[in-house]
Amino acid sequence: MRAIWNGVVSFGLVSVAVRLYAATYNHDIRFHQVHEVDGGRIRYKRVCEVCGNEVDYADLAKGYETEDGELVTLDSDDLASLPLSSSREIEVVEFVPAEQVDPLLLDRSYYLEPDPKAVKPYALLREALRRADQMAVVKVALRQRETLALLRVRGEVIVMQTMLWPDEVREPDFQTLADGIDLKPQELQMASVLINSLQGEFDPSQFEDEYRAAVEELIDYKRQHGGARPVPAAATAAGEPIGDLLTALKRSVEEARATRSGSTPAPGGAPAGGGAPAGGGAAGGSAAGGGAADGGGAASGGTAGGDPLAGSAPASGKKKPAAPKAPAARKPDSRKAAAKAEPAPAKKTGGRSKRGA
């Protein structure tokens, strides 16, 4: 077990250092809600019912709706101004007989373990409670909220049971029990005989949760007969809904690049497959500096002039008219530019080449 709280029990001038452990837990089998078709987990999101947008946790506030239809909102600063108790003390208020405590007031149970240096005062308090057949009414602050609790003895351990406040217990108001009911002596006698015939010593270990056992048996049966499958992986971030304008624009740019280049864009922002012909790099750089490619009019579609998509066409998807427009089958003007930069080959005569001076 793992301690969830530590502090001291104080009664009079005696203090006992203790650690707090949860005494109970729920043994129910826990299920996840999944999509029956593919087994994917069902997730819930915080959606505002007014604007329909998903709300981040940081933008949440607490709202109290009054009986006359007004909403009072409390933010984190308002809640921080409340008088929260940070005391680490279990203060004994009084000792009361066990029969005076209504079990309906009892809430959660915790074990108190003494600090190694406080074993003797712990044992002293335990034995005093056992001999007097009393319970200690205490005040304690758990999760920064003060609550009432009881200290009682269970075996060799002191148990602390938190209590509900009196106004948290409802009063029964059943009209059917308000009217007088006439019971005959013979009926009471027969009921007493039945009770006596079913008397016994209470042993909780003789009872079993049959429903839980049946669920475990059903799960095991389905596992052995092909009713199980691997847990599916969660969807990637690309499949998540778009929550803001900037994300939508970025994804639109990526999709446009991929559509133009015919492949997925590289992380650096340039098209993975290349938006321009392989031989057109020099012509594209010339067009960026001077606005026109060498020997062939304007650059194709004007993309070298600073298109935000950095692809082979403008973001609008429409090409600007070229004057004159080169045939689609011809390569860009990089060959002409390369031809000017290199010396012309010599004419062949008689099977041997002659170069000019």
Image (spheres, rainbow, N blue to C red):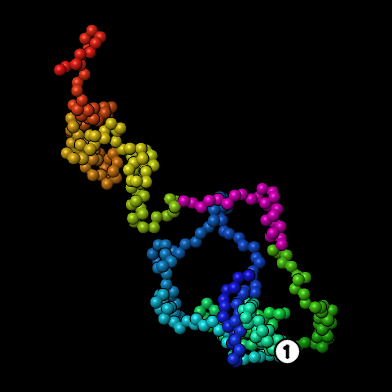
Give the labeled residue for mark 1: 131
- Position of residue 264 measured from the top left corner of the image (x, y, whole percent): 39, 42
Quadrant that contains the C terminus: top left
Residue sitting at x 27%, y 46%: 308
Q: Is residue 307 left or right of residue 97?
A: left
In this view, 354 is above or below 105: above
Is 268 inside the magenta-drawn segment? Answer: no
Task: Tell me what residue is drawn at x 42 percent, y 55 percent.
Answer: 241
Return the residue nearer the eye: 57 or 189: 57
Tell whether position 224 is magenta. yes
Q: Is residue 292 visible to the viewer in this orientation of the structure?
A: yes
Q: Give residue 305's quadrant in the image.
A: top left
Looking at this rendering, what residue extends furthest in the top direction? 350
Q: Residue at x 74, y 67 (%)?
A: 208
The residue sitting at the left extreme is 357
Q: Position of residue 261 (x, y in %)?
A: 34, 38
